[in-house]
Image (cartoon, rainbow, N blue to C red):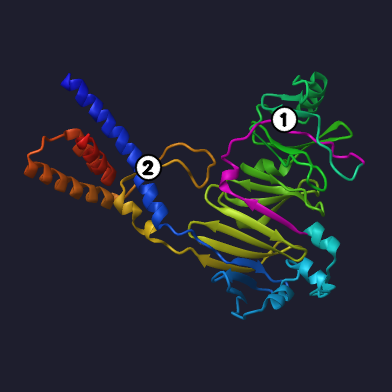
């Protein structure tokens, strides 16, 4: 009987210790970690340098440029007219041209866009059912389709109301895809499944041979083209973006951290002058008719690039270093084992194990020696499994051992 009781106690010890390997580090990290706040930064087409706004308090805001010139709110609007264009138009201060380039509301709306990328965009749950809109409706607004398609080992269109497969439409599109050389099973399907956009370009499909195909529906017929230049790269991710000027289809990421535009000029790839690690870095692009302000954020800080909108070359760069807090400095020295359920680059939640360095093991050994010395002094019964748990986990093992001794 005592043997089974000991086994149960050991199981409880291991389970409780693993639970504390999540709770204790998570609690300490929440208390100590400071979330990094970067000032809002945008490339000024007037000053041709980065300008930023930062809240020092609820009442005080600092507006300045890289040359450390400070501005009032109205002055700041004037040096960034393509960002604050609504305010500039309402006060009649919007310039007709900037550096010889004519500025109109049409150009601002058609050439401007915002694009965000987060590593979680790749590793995230999704329902593999997609609406294929009619690209040419003859109407001002796009209309949502009456069916959804799924594509893996083939393509099937499913009627939303009856939940039945439309065999004729499915075979029609399947034959069109095979004729263009697609190889099943399909690994990814990228698109922008919403009617809240100026037009529809359908989806980009990555097949089993890593060949990329463009599929959309025009006048109820399949339109399919292969992006042949993408055969030379290993595609990691694609972000569709139906921009107003129709210059490109979206942004392609490869396994070398390179980013490309798939242009509407015969699906040519245009390499962008910055790189993005899709597993570790976030990207934000704020574009206007003259410049793109590109932000690349990682655990080291944030890099800023000003990219000319016409030739897509970098005209200016800036870096902001991330400040290292107490948790960043010392957690690897304190916890030899940590468990987290969330990850920076994934939207899935499950136990993830992180290990400390050799100094954390040394700390655990020191704690274990103290624990054994106290047991000897109090003539407590030695428990080998408890000592092993303390050696491997440190503080969580001590807490669980003490709790179980009192129960």
Q: Which residue is mark 1?
A: 182
Q: Give residue 373's mark.
A: none
Q: Is residue 123 left or right of residue 213?
A: left
Residue 393's x, y, as percent?
A: 28, 43
How would you rate the neighbour count of disc 2 (Cα within 10 Å): few for under 14, some for 14-19, many for 20 or more? some
Instruction: Residue 233: tell me if it is visible.
Output: no
Kindly state the secondary structure of the residue where label 1 is placed: loop
**In this picture, residue 59 sits left or right of residue 82:** left
Q: Is residue 42 visible?
A: yes
Residue at the image position 16 percent from the left and 34 percent from the top: 383
Residue located at (64% from left, 72% from top): 51
Q: Quadrant of residue 142?
A: top right
| Disc 1 crowd, CA 10 A, few/some/many (<14, 14-19, 20+) | many
Q: What secondary structure predominates along the stretch shown in magenta?
A: loop
Give 133 or 371, whichever is nearer the viewer: 371
**Quadrant in which the C terminus appears:** top left
Residue 128 in the magenta stretch? The answer is yes
Q: Quadrant of the N terminus?
A: top left
Can you give x and y, in whole percent of width and height, for residue 102 in the image? Answer: 85, 70
User: Is 370 situated above or below 99?
Assistant: above
Q: Is residue 116 left or right of residue 369?
A: right
Q: Is residue 320 magenta?
A: no
Q: Is residue 400 above or below residue 280?
A: above
> How far apart are the two marked residues, 2 and 1, measured between alpha carbons?
46 Å
Please tell me which of labels 2 and 1 falls first in the chain. Answer: 2
Residue position marked by numbered label 2 in the rendering:
22
Foreground residue among 406 and 278: 406
Q: Does the CB distance between marks 2 and 1 fall below 8 Å?
A: no
Residues drawn in magenta: 112-138
């Amino acid at each position: 009987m005592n043997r089974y009781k000991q086994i149960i106690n050991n199981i409880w010890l291991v389970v409780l210790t693993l639970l504390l390997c999540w709770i204790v580090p998570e609690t300490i990290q929440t208390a100590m970690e400071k979330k990094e706040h970067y000032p809002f930064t945008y490339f000024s087409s007037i000053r041709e340098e980065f300008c930023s706004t930062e809240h020092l308090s609820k009442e005080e805001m600092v507006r300045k440029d890289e040359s450390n010139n400070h501005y009032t709110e109205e002055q700041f609007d004037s040096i960034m007219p393509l960002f604050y264009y609504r305010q500039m138009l309402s006060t009649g201060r919007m310039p007709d041209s900037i550096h010889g380039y004519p500025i109109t509301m049409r150009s601002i709306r058609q050439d401007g866009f915002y694009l965000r990328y987060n590593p979680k965009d790749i590793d995230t749950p999704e329902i593999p059912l997609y609406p294929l809109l009619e690209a040419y409706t003859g109407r001002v607004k796009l209309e949502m389709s009456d069916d959804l398609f799924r594509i893996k080992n083939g393509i099937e269109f499913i009627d939303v109301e009856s939940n039945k497969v439309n065999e004729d439409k499915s075979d029609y599109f399947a034959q069109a895809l095979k004729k263009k050389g697609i190889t099943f099973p399909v690994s990814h399907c990228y698109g922008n499944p919403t009617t809240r956009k100026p037009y529809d370009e359908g989806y980009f499909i990555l097949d089993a041979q890593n060949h990329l195909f463009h599929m959309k529906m025009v006048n109820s017929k399949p339109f399919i083209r292969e992006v042949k230049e993408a055969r030379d790269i290993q595609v990691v991710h694609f972000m569709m973006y139906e921009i107003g000027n129709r210059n490109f289809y979206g942004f392609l990421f490869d396994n070398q951290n390179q980013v490309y535009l798939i242009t509407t000029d015969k699906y040519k790839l245009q390499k962008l002058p910055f790189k993005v690690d899709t597993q570790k870095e976030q990207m934000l692009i704020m574009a206007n008719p003259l410049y793109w302000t590109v932000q690349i954020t990682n655990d080291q800080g944030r890099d800023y690039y000003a990219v000319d909108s016409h030739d897509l070359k970098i005209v200016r760069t800036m870096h902001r270093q991330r400040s290292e807090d107490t948790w960043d400095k010392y957690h690897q020295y304190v916890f030899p084992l940590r468990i987290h359920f969330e990850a920076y680059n994934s939207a899935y939640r499950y136990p993830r194990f992180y290990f400390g360095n050799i100094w954390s093991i040394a700390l655990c050994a020191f704690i274990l020696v103290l624990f054994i010395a106290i047991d000897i002094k109090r003539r407590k019964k030695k428990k080998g499994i408890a000592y092993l748990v303390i050696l491997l986990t440190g503080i969580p093992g001590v807490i669980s051992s003490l709790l179980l001794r009192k129960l």
